[in-house]
Image (cartoon, rainbow, N blue to C red):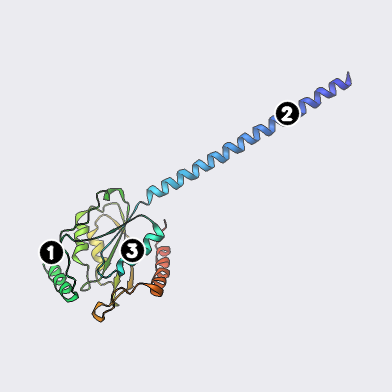
Amino acid sequence: MKKILLLIVAVVIVAGAILFWVTNQSGTSQTTKTQSTSQKNKETSKMAENKTLIVYYSRTGNTKAVAELIHDRVGGDLVQIETKEARPKDYRSEVSQNAQEQNNNTLPALKTKVSNFDDYNRVFIGTPTWNMALPQAVESFMNDYNFSGKIVIPFNTNGGYGAGSTFSQIKSGTKGAKVLDGFSVEGGQETNGVLLAIKGNRRVEVAKELDKWLQKINIEK
């Protein structure tokens, strides 16, 4: 009789241990699944939060080079601002036409259209410095869209004389947006025949400067 009782007790103990193990494993699996789902939801939410557009205007390719470096780091969509009418290829002719457009506040019509602009909440705007100011094509782009509620991040290339009024113009041209500190870097000096300067070793140097800037303004993918 004692043996039978001991056997029954042993069976009950083993069954209880098995039940505890199965329940514990199920709970752990469910917790892991819940954590995984939560992480995916956070990542999806973050991607939705950071829908990024990188637009740029570039004559010789330096502003384009910086735009590509930014795109490599933060992703998003990369769009070049282009005018309907072709710009002069000759540097002096371009300088003259641009100065006239600035003086007359002429906004050239754009070939570039961003049909889903409202979907973006983060917009990088890249521009060279022309006559110490924005090219009018960039003014045209800002005039065509509503930036209210968006984060705007300007970046600039120049011939060594700085961003001029480009950043302040971008701020005034994107009313309702939160405009972050811009990035400015020396590119080519077309007057001296130096066109695409941001390449090779210089591109690597600019990339390092860019990384520091993105970290400073707390921008990530």
Real-space CA distance between mark 3 and mark 2, rounded to the nearest whole angstrom: 64 Å
Comparing labels 1 and 3, the label whose residue is closer to the camera: 3
Which residue is located at x 25 percent, y 63 percent? 170
Report the Cα–Cα distance between label 1 and label 3.
Answer: 26 Å
Which residue appears farthest toward the right when viewing the image?
A: 2
In the displayed structure image, the side of residue 27 where residue 61 appears, left or right: left
SS for tag 2?
A: helix
Considering every residue shown, the one lying at the far left of the view is 104
- The residue under label 1 is which amino acid type? Thr
Secondary structure category for the residue under label 3:
helix
**CB-based contact (under 8 Å), mark 3 and mark 2:** no
Left or right: where 165 falls relative to 213: left
**Given the image, on which type of amino acid does mark 3 rest?**
Ala
Dot 1 or dot 3: first in sequence order is 3
From the viewer's perspective, tell me whether residue 92 is left or right of residue 41: left
Q: Quadrant of residue 52?
A: bottom left
Q: Amino acid at mark 2?
A: Gly
The residue identified by callout 1 is 106
Query: Residue 120, how many percent across, how many down?
Result: 31, 51
| Disc 3 crowd, CA 10 A, few/some/many (<14, 14-19, 20+) | many
Point out the tag, 2 or 1, that comes first from the N-terminus: 2
Residue 46 - label: none
Dot 2: few (<14), some (14–19), or many (≥20) neighbours within 10 Å?
few
- Give x and y (percent) for residue 1: 88, 18
Q: Nearer the viewer, residue 141 or 162?
A: 141
Of mark 3 and mark 2, the one earlier in the sequence is 2
* Mark number displayed over residue 16: 2
- Residue located at (24% from left, 60% from top): 81
On screen, residue 167 above or below 28: below
Between circles 3 and 2, the one closer to the viewer is 3
Please name the residue that numbered disc 3 is placed on.
67
Q: Residues within 10 Å of mark 1 (few under 14, many from 20)?
A: some
